């Protein structure tokens, strides 16, 4: 079977996109659809390459029973050909991806929260990095809603 390959992208790959990666992977595992999906995440920037997710994001994920063990990596040219769906957390990530992406693959790139049934099509997952703990729980709620709908539409 051809796998649906999904790549989540944020700025640092230590908060939003590794969470989305794990939330979707967990939903896929629970639905026994592991063979149907390939899921990964990456960042636009290079600052955190090799790092585990931010401790605040890991603590929030843990409250929901998820362990974040992803190691940050930066987007690579080959990602645009490889993945079917490339999901940006915010509009800055979206425009960076559009700039980096070869023209023939640009239709693969979308704002992740277009899958959030509680939000309009321009909604973003805001960067929680410089804010307080409530920013991280807010990110979790948006990510979970969006992943549920994403999986519903692709399974
Ligand atoms: P993320 O959050 O894009 O959700 O991983 C950030 C993490 C680090 C930085 C910015 C955003 N930073 O500037 O180092």
Image (spheres, rainbow, N blue to C red):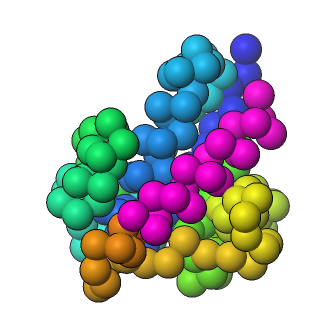
Which quarter of the figure has residue 38?
top right
Residue nearer the viewer, 121 or 107: 121
Q: Which residues are magenta?
A: 137-155
Measuring from the top left, give residue 95's x and y in whole percent: 64, 81
- Quick check: 152 above or below 57? above
- Quick check: 20 above or below 119? above
Q: Quadrant of ligand 1?
A: bottom left
Please tell me which residue is depicted at 39% across the width and 64% down the height of the picture.
137
- Quick check: 81 above or below 116? above
Please tell me which residue is depicted at 63% across the width and 37% down the height of the picture.
5
Please tell me which residue is depicted at 47% across the width and 31% down the height of the picture.
26
Measuring from the top left, give residue 81's x and y in whole percent: 66, 48
Which quarter of the figure has residue 83?
top right
Residue nearer the viewer, 76 or 44: 44
Measuring from the top left, give residue 120's x and y in whole percent: 78, 74
Measuring from the top left, give residue 50's x and y in whole percent: 21, 54
Please tell me which residue is depicted at 64% across the width and 53% down the height of the picture.
146
Q: Is residue 91 left or right of 134 when viewed as pictured?
A: right
């Amino acid at each position: 079977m051809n796998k649906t390959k999904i790549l989540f992208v944020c700025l640092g790959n230590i908060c939003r996109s590794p969470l989305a990666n794990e939330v979707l992977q967990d939903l896929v595992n629970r639905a026994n659809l592991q063979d149907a999906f390939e899921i990964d995440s990456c960042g636009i920037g290079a600052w955190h390459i090799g790092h585990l997710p931010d401790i605040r994001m890991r603590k929030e994920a843990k409250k929901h029973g998820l362990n974040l063990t992803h190691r940050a990596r930066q987007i690579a040219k080959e990602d645009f050909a490889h993945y079917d769906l490339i999901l940006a957390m915010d509009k800055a990530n979206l425009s960076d991806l559009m700039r980096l992406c070869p023209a023939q693959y640009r239709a693969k790139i979308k704002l992740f929260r277009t899958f959030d049934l509680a939000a309009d099509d321009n909604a973003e997952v805001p960067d929680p990095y410089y804010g307080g703990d409530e920013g991280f729980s807010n990110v979790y709620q948006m990510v979970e809603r969006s992943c549920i709908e994403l999986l519903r539409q692709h399974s």
